Image: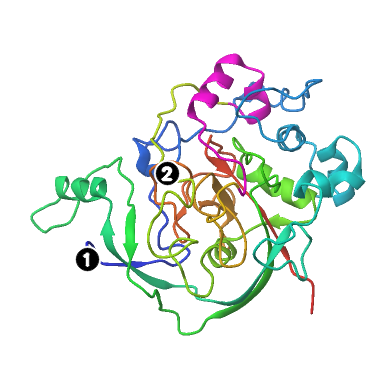
Amino acid sequence: MASGGPERAGAAADAETAPPDAAVADPPGAAAELSYTPAEPPDAAAELSYTPAEPPDAGAAMSYAAAAALDGGSLDAAAAPDAAAAALDGGSPDAVAEALDGGAPDAGLPGSSEGCPDDMVLVEGDYCPVVDQICLKHHKEYEKDQERRATPYKEAEGPTSVSERCLEYRRPSECLSKKRAPMRFCVDRYEWPNRKGELPALLVSWRQAVKACEGVGKRLCTEDEFNFACEGEEMLPYTYGFVRDATKCNIDRPFRQREVTLYHYERCMRHPKCKAELERLDQRVPAGSMPACVSPFGAYDLNGNINEWVVRLGRKSPERSGLKGGWWGPMRGRCRPTVGFHKEEDYGYEQGFRCCKDAAAR
């Protein structure tokens, strides 16, 4: 039996509304999709360029070179890719491929890298800008919350801390657009630093993500690019199909409320209290470690694990930032929704990214 009406899943149709206090404090619960962290305190700028002699040994550690590139401010948007490579791998431009893709092209993995760097996959086909995805069965937690907030007109009202999780969608999804849009581009196979077996970056702002991608000759993905890379021409709600499955992607883990202010990653690793809090919160898994969490084009972990920054075209600063894909918590964790109220300087323990790039001409 269907619960709820059709879901209009255009790029902007699923953007969540910001809670009243989003600019000054955490959202009132899990429904906001992530634990909000405001921009770095004023005294942090001087510390961001500091690089300790040895990588931190925290269990939550990402690639140290990648963290230094993000937090050290060394990647300028106008910097040449070779200069950024040197910043990423400690001074050896020739080693940047190894730093980013694990040292060798991913042989035998799904997808094609034709027209793309070896650490990326080709996304090519006809994209539907607006789709209709009808949920047949919601999670019991969501259904109970809807009932609790129901009015005499059967519409839910009032604040909630429960995210809308759909357990099964009707097949197939329906394209509501009059025409599909041809797309052809490259997307990182894994979340930044785009290295199989490594934990994805976190505590990253949208602007840091933009600079990091540009520094290696790529760019941050747009909303539509993320949608298509995630769902394919079949317009799948989840990368793996129409039925939600927490054994396939890193989703639906217990929510843990943030209790301590967190800094950008490298600075956090130098502060024992911040470091301990991050380790308590962190439920990431290594990139590519869940082989079924792969999109029709061969990109891994587009649902769950870490929320990914994207560019919202047609908007002005500081509204160009969006988050997609969901993270490890009990959130929506699917392809189409965009969280749009986090500003470009915001960062959080669930926020990371991956890069896109124009594919080479045929």
The answer to whether 254 is drawn above or below residue 245 in the figure is: above
Secondary element under disc 2, as helix, strand or loop, is loop
Residue 95: which quarter of the image? top right
The answer to whether 283 is drawn above or below residue 249 in the figure is: above
Residue 76: which quarter of the image? top right
Q: What type is the residue that disc 1 sits on?
A: Ala
Question: Is residue 4 within the magenta segment?
Answer: no
Q: What type is the residue that disc 2 sits on?
A: Glu
- Crowding at label 1, few (<14), some or many (≥20) Cα neighbours within 10 Å? few
Q: Quadrant of the N terminus?
A: bottom left
Pick whichever, 27 or 241, lies toward us. 241
Pick whichever, 268 or 252, lies toward us. 252
Q: CA distance from mark 1 to mark 2?
A: 24 Å
Secondary element under disc 1, as helix, strand or loop, is loop
Residue at the location (36% across, 73% down)?
Answer: 171
Residue at the location (57% across, 33% down)?
Answer: 39
> Which circle, 1 or 2, is nearer the viewer?
1
> Is residue 82 rendered to the left or right of residue 10?
right
Q: Quadrant of the C terminus?
A: bottom right
> Is residue 166 rendered to the left or right of residue 248?
left
Q: Considering only order in the chain, which callout, 2 or 1, is on the residue closer to the N terminus?
A: 1
Pick whichever, 23 or 300, lies toward us. 300
Residue at the location (59% across, 46% down)?
Answer: 289
- Crowding at label 2, few (<14), some or many (≥20) Cα neighbours within 10 Å? many
What residue range appears in magenta? 263-288
Relative image position of residue 186 (x, y in whole percent): 70, 65
Relative image position of residue 72 (x, y in whole percent): 75, 32
Kindly identify which numbered label has been placed on residue 33: 2
CB of mark 1 within 8 Å of CB of mark 2? Answer: no
Q: Can you identify the residue that label 1 sits on?
A: 2
Task: Specify the color scheme.
Answer: rainbow
Relative image position of residue 294 (x, y in whole percent): 56, 59
